[in-house]
Image (cartoon, helix red, strand yellow):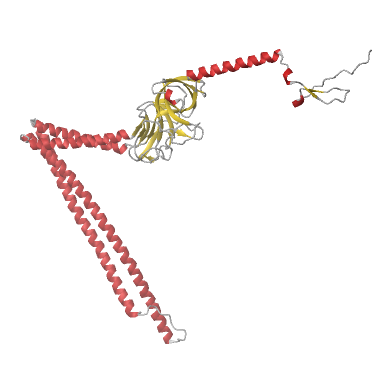
Amino acid sequence: MSSGPPTAKVEKVRGMNASLTTETGTGNPLSERDPGRLHITRRQVVFALGLAILVVVATIYTISSVSAGDQSFPAVVTTSKVFNLNFATTAKVTAVTVKVGQHVKPGQVLATQDSAALKTQEAADAQTVTADTEVLSQANSPQLTAAQREQDSLEVEQGQVAVDNAEAALQSEIATGKANVASAGVTVTNAESLETSDDAQYTQACPKGPVAPASNLAGAPLAAAQASYARCQTLQTDVTQDEIAVNQAQAELGVVKAQAQQAVNSAQSTVDSSQIALNVSEGQVSLATSPSPPSAIAQAQSNLNQAQAQLAEIQQELKDAMLVAPDGGVIAEIYGVAGEYLGPDGVHIYPNAPALPENQSSGFTLFPAQPSAQGSSSSSSGDEPLIELVGGAQQVLAQVPQSNVSSLQVGHSVSVYFSALNITETGVVTGVGLSPTRDSNAVTYDVTITLKRTVSGLLPGMSASVQQ
């Protein structure tokens, strides 16, 4: 082999010196490759061309998606109505007939109150209406049969007897009460007299009260001092007991007076009731025996109107003793049980979901606050409800950026995806909030969307995605 110059060996170098070479076997320093002579392989050209095509396709797809409005916005399931339900008056709850999560229909009974007293009053008022109706009928047509007139006369006689008996009982109660009060008064007088006598005797005999004998006494003086001391103690005890007796007698006198007055009032009430019944009976007889003047007919009509109003009021109270669902929906909360005395302010209806407060952050804070168990919601009364019912149409509340809200007008149809149920439903925009939510990242508006159909299993608070 011929000897010649050593062959140059090129070493691959990473980094910034990738274009530099070294020659082994020589002492020559590294030489720099000429930039003008960079080589591009065919594979690199194909790769660059493919990348450029991919960028162009992605750009076209993005522009097409934006133009077509293919965007989604976070939302949450809400409802169009929330009902805080309670009884109109406070009474004992006899039953709660629903459970949390139960679906109810409009008019379904949810709970009941004790209405025994109301039913008794209703029966009495109904009898009064019947009697007043008969009186008015007789006033307009006073032609009665002999048997009817005889019956009316008998009722008058019986009514008069009842009045006489009631007045006699009243006079008896008055006399008995006076006698009892007088007797109790004598007891007080005697106790006071005895107290005055004993007190005077004690004051005279023991001006300084009971004084114990001196220690230096002996014999007859000591015996006399001891006797005086014992007598003063006895007199002092008598005065104390007299004072107690006076106080007891005065207290008993007050009780006797109260009992006597109560008995007289009760007897007087019986007299008044008997007199009213007698007046009605006499009025019936008068109408049966002579033509009724216009004033009598007007009075009979007025009495009937009053009785009917009283009956209607009691019937309304009976109706209020049954708590019914004002609309179909789901029982969200129950805050009471049978046996409690509940019923502050009746029914509160919330026709619309409350709007989000300003400056509220976006995300999962979309669901509007519902009334709490303590009644601290939008209820004006501030009283706690018995049952909270979520009803009305199913809705979602979405937060839409300001750049997209103009394309979601009321009446516009959108698709809503529910991840919990893995379904997509169609909804209609039914409201666009005018107060924006502002934060450091964006400005959004609340958009209410009502679903076109009721979705089984869809509950308030579930997450949703609205696709424009």
Horizontal and vertical percent position of residue 248: 32, 63
Q: Nearer the viewer, residue 165 or 435?
A: 435
Confirm whether residue 97 shows in the render.
no
Horizontal and vertical percent position of residue 218: 45, 86
Name which quarter of the figure residue 244 lies in. bottom left
Q: Residue at x 68, y 14 (%)?
A: 45
Up/down of 157 relative to 109, above or below: below
Task: Give the tally of numbered discs.
Answer: 0
Confirm whether residue 192 shows in the render.
yes
The N terminus sits in image quarter? top right
Q: Nearer the viewer, residue 6 or 72?
A: 6
Q: Nearer the viewer, residue 194 or 41?
A: 41
Horizontal and vertical percent position of residue 86: 36, 36
Q: Is residue 161 left or right of residue 450?
A: left
Q: Nearer the viewer, residue 288 or 430?
A: 430
Up/down of 169 relative to 183, above or below: above
Q: Residue furthest left?
A: 290
Up/down of 376 relative to 170, above or below: above
Q: Residue at x 30, y 76 (%)?
A: 200
Name which quarter of the figure residue 456 lies in. top left
Horizontal and vertical percent position of residue 215: 47, 84
